[in-house]
Image (spheres, rainbow, N blue to C red):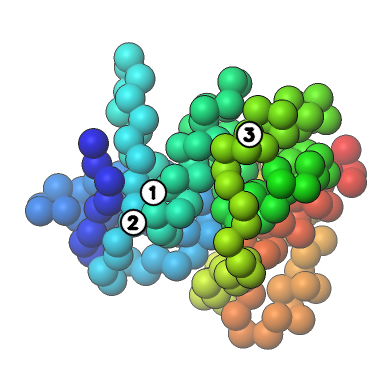
Amino acid sequence: MIASVSGPVAALAPDTAVVEVGGIGMAVQCTPGTLSTLRVGEQARLATSLVVREDSLTLYGFADDDERQTFELLQTASGVGPRLAQAMLAVHSPDALRRAFASGDEKALTAVPGIGKKGAQKLLLELKDRLGAPRGAVAAPAPAATAGWQDQLHAALVGLGYAPREADEAVAAVAPQAEAAGGTPQVGQLLRAALQTLNRAR
């Protein structure tokens, strides 16, 4: 129904961007990697997928059409709703997911909060042939502003279901990696590293 939205970014929250379209502010749920590419006041175009429920209409936003299509394909598996599909895209790019399903990589799927070993095995069976073959090298996430990467990462982890204390520990654990990146720490990469740290701790 709503395939994309374009307009100035009116506001940003830990998991939502508000994009002004024809004078209307559209709230769009996005992954931390997508949010890190947006700036308040600047023009943006997000590919979108509208999820309709009896009691809600939720618009999910993506950096490109490939992410949106992957999001929709993931939900064709039983037990995968929009939040889990978005969590999978927060941890892995579409091409990384295609590689994981093509190679039967359980470990890559269990890195996603909410997916255990049995769930990963079930998803591999259901989705192996639906996502298609990998299309090439994984594109690096766009760099986020240096200021506030800790807040972005913390909010993303809490949004994925971790306790604030766990999120604090994970942010501290990846701080050396962020410092090594110099002036442009990439929130998408740091999120993957933080999730690996949390999974080892559990």
Which residue is situated farthest in the bottom direction here?
A: 182
User: Nearest the camera: 150 or 129?
Assistant: 129
- Residue displayed at 62% across by 52% down: 133
Q: Are marks 2 and 1 in contact (CB under 8 Å)?
A: yes
- Residue displayed at 77% across by 47% down: 103
Q: Position of residue 136 (x, y in %)?
A: 61, 67
Q: Is residue 84 visible?
A: yes
Left or right? Give the position of 69 relative to 57. Answer: right
User: Nearest the camera: 67 or 167?
Assistant: 67
- Residue displayed at 30% across by 28% down: 57
Report the amino acid beneath label 3. Answer: Leu
Q: How many labels does the image show?
A: 3
Name the mark on residue 3.
none
Foreground tag (3 vs 2):
3
Name the mark on residue 61.
1
Q: Position of residue 179 (x, y in %)?
A: 73, 79
Label 2 neighbourhood size at 10 Å, few (<14), some (14-19), many (20+)?
many
Q: Where is residue 107 in the image (x, y as percent from the top left)?
A: 83, 44
Label 1 neighbourhood size at 10 Å, few (<14), some (14-19), many (20+)?
many
Q: Alpha-carbon distance for marks 1 and 3?
A: 22 Å
Name the mark on residue 127.
3
Report the amino acid beneath label 2. Answer: Leu
Left or right? Give the position of 78 relative to 109. Answer: left
Q: Mark 2 points at which residue?
A: 46
Q: Alpha-carbon distance for marks 2 and 1?
A: 6 Å
Query: Looking at the rendering, in which quadrant would you find the N terminus?
Result: top left
Foreground tag (1 vs 3):
3
Q: Are marks 1 and 3 in contact (CB under 8 Å)?
A: no
Location of residue 171 by image quarter: bottom right
